[in-house]
């Protein structure tokens, strides 16, 4: 599945903890992102990123920073639903669900209380990207993966090992032993390669930083986050179809929106009226500005004159448009939920 071997899935089922290094995702082909596949398959919806400044031993734009960012990992553009609709326009759908939003918010509060990662497993990784341009050159900073390993050790209850590694890393930093990305003549003493930096951390195992705050995880039990409680079930809202957005690939008549609108109005069946035409989200009809730049991708909004559109009204409209030489590339139904529009109102509509 997407570059992951069956035996890897078997191992993850037996040991639901994963320390993963950065992997480059092929662009425009090959396989889907392994990161996204792991997250969505294993339900790793919470991306937890501690952000701490180590000023003055490492230059920092915000010296007092000490926060944890919890980011949703599965929805929005991670859905990977993409289409090319015309010669000039591509589309990426951003799908966001109410349960997904509630789950990540509840997880963040649970994390603040328990410091746990995921419900059925946990993946720990460096999030800085794979940096293929410096691979094998002994210049990368291994700190991201090292600290991910520290978090993994805490997750499985190895607090002593996590404490020793983290403190040795802090001691290395405050002694001015830095990799190339952190090296600065004001705060650094030596510029080390990847292997040399790792050796420096190993040599300081058992030591604690003298100036930066030392960490002490001895009292930290393995406390995975509790499954966020689902919100109370909501009553289904009244859903009424009142129109449809029809998207066209049209590149005629100098892309004149008025010409397009006249053809659309002539093709519309009784009971439906054209209310607005937009291009790249900008209203171009009625009363569009003549200087608006237009591509070959048009959104044409039709609404029911009576306020409610029967389901068969949409295919009837599409057939009429096809017969008029205006085949649709995509449609989106326009619904009201408990009387409120479930779609964005077009500019000037």
Image (cartoon, grey):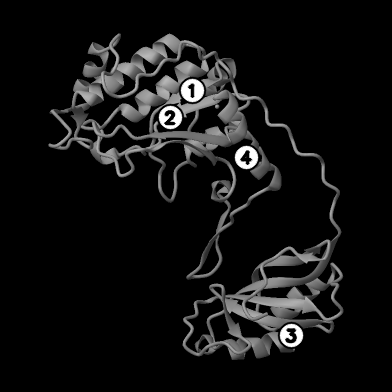
The answer to which of 287 and 257 lies nearer the viewer is: 287
| Residue beneath disc 1 | 18
C-beta proximity under 8 Å, tags 1 and 2: yes
| Residue beneath disc 4 | 105
C-beta proximity under 8 Å, tags 3 and 1: no
| Residue beneath disc 2 | 125
Give the spatial CA distance, label 1 vs label 2: 8 Å
Among the two numbered marks 2 and 4 on one chain, the one whose residue lies closer to the N terminus: 4
* Point 77% across, 77% down: residue: 303
Disc 4 on helix, strand or loop? helix
Among the two numbered marks 3 and 1 on one chain, the one whose residue lies closer to the N terminus: 1
Disc 1 on helix, strand or loop? strand
Locate residue 252, reporting x and y percent: 54, 85
| Residue beneath disc 3 | 267
The answer to which of 349 and 2 lies nearer the viewer is: 349
Q: Residues within 10 Å of mark 3 (few under 14, many from 20)?
A: some
Q: Quadrant of the N terminus?
A: top right
C-beta proximity under 8 Å, tags 3 and 4: no
* Point 59% across, 21% down: residue: 224
Locate residue 241, reporting x and y percent: 82, 67
Res 159 label: none
Among the two numbered marks 3 and 2 on one chain, the one whose residue lies closer to the N terminus: 2
């Amino acid at each position: 599945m997407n570059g992951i071997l069956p035996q890897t899935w078997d191992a993850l089922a037996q040991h639901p903890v994963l320390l993963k290094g950065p992997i480059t995702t092929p662009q425009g082909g090959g396989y889907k992102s392994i990161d996204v596949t792991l997250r969505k398959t294993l339900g790793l919806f919470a991306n937890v990123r501690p952000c701490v400044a180590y000023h003055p031993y490492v230059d920092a734009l915000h010296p007092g920073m000490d926060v944890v960012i919890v980011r949703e990992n599965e929805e929005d553009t991670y859905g990977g639903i993409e289409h090319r609709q015309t010669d000039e326009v591509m589309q990426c759908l951003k799908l966001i669900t109410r349960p997904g939003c509630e789950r990540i918010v509840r997880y963040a509060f649970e994390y603040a209380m328990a410091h746990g990662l995921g419900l059925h497993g946990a993946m720990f990784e460096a999030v800085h990207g794979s940096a293929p341009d410096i691979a094998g050159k002994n210049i990368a900073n291994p700190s991201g993966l090292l600290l991910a390993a520290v978090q993994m050790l805490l997750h499985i209850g190895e607090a002593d090992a996590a404490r020793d590694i983290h403190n040795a890393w802090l001691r290395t930093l405050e002694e001015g032993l830095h990799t190339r990305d952190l090296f600065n003549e004001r705060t650094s003493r030596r510029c080390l390669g990847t292997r040399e930096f790792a050796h420096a951390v190993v040599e300081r195992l058992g030591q604690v930083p003298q100036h930066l705050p030392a960490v002490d995880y001895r009292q930290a039990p393995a406390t995975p986050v509790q499954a966020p409680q689902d919100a109370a079930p909501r009553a289904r809202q009244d859903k009424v179809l009142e129109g449809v957005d029809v998207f066209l690939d049209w590149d005629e008549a100098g892309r004149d929106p008025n010409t397009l609108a006249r053809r659309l109005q002539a093709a519309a069946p009784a009971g439906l009226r054209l209310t607005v035409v937009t291009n790249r989200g900008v209203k171009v009809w009625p009363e569009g500005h003549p200087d608006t730049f237009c591509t070959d991708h048009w959104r044409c909004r039709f609404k029911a004159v009576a306020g409610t559109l029967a389901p068969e009204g949409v295919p009837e409209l599409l057939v009429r448009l096809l017969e008029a030489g205006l085949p649709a590339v995509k449609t989106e139904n326009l619904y009201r939920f408990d009387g409120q529009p479930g779609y964005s109102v077009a500019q000037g509509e």
